[in-house]
Amino acid sequence: MRRALRRVVMAGCVQLDARMVELLARLGNEVLAAGCELIFLAGANAWLAQDDALLLAALHPRLRGRYRLVAATSEAEWLETIAGRALLISGRFHHSIAAAAVGTALLIAGSNTAKNEGLIDRLGLNPDAVWMDAAQPDVASTRLAALLRNPAAGTVDPARLAQLRDLARGNFEKLPRRG
């Protein structure tokens, strides 16, 4: 029986400098060398974010076009691209929340605030398993390899996820009802 091809999604980062571009290119090549399909997720609405376009232009020659581009034009397409994948590699806050909610493992970078660090804590994930830093590319590569072997360290415990969903639901229960 053939093993199903593992699919890894990569999305951009707010903190996108030359070192982060190099790290994402390196990780993308390592995903491909591990025999996985690499999917680059751009956009989340009808317009491609400028930084996604810049990142893709920088990554394209380094990855030699060996990825599938999904330029999502709807929330449903965006979420479908993240769901059911082996891993999400990104520094985007909302992408990481979505991945956590649908059971996709995370390898996450910093953002323009400490929100991603806070998200890792809130999700109950170990930063030593899921955090990537462009200043430590070898550490990021080691964490990627570990998550590709066993994504459990990058996924949120179902009980924790249920608690977070209950808390989120509670945010809306006290809103006034219309009509």
Image: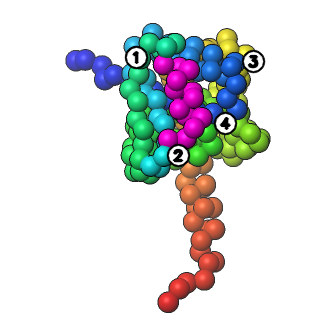
Judge from the rendering whether residue 123 lies leftward or rightward of residue 9; answer left or right: right
Q: CA distance from mark 1 to mark 4?
A: 24 Å
x, y percent for residue 140: 65, 18
Residue annotated with mark 1? 66
Residue 68 visible at all? yes
* N-terminal label among 4 and 2: 4
Residue extent of the magenta highlight: 48-60
Q: Nearer the viewer, mark 3 or mark 4?
A: 4
Amino acid at circle 1 = Arg
Kind of residue at badge 2: Ala
Asked if residue 59 lies in the magenta stretch, the reply is: yes
Quarter occupied by residue 27: top right
Q: Is residue 158 magenta?
A: no
Number of other residues with Cα within 10 Å of mark 4, as a class: few under 14, some 14 to 19, many 20 or more? some
Residue in the picture at 56% in, 17% down = 25
14 or 6, which lies in front? 14
| Quadrant of the drawing holding the N terminus | top left
Disc nearer the start of the sequence (3/2): 2
Q: Secondary structure at mark 2?
A: helix
Quickly name the residue at label 4.
14
Do callouts 1 and 4 mark residues in contact (Cβ within 8 Å)?
Answer: no
Q: CA distance from mark 4 to mark 2?
A: 17 Å
Residue toward you, 29 or 101: 29
Residue 39 vertical position relative to residue 125 in the rendered view, above or below: above
Mark 3, mark 1: which one is toward the viewer?
1
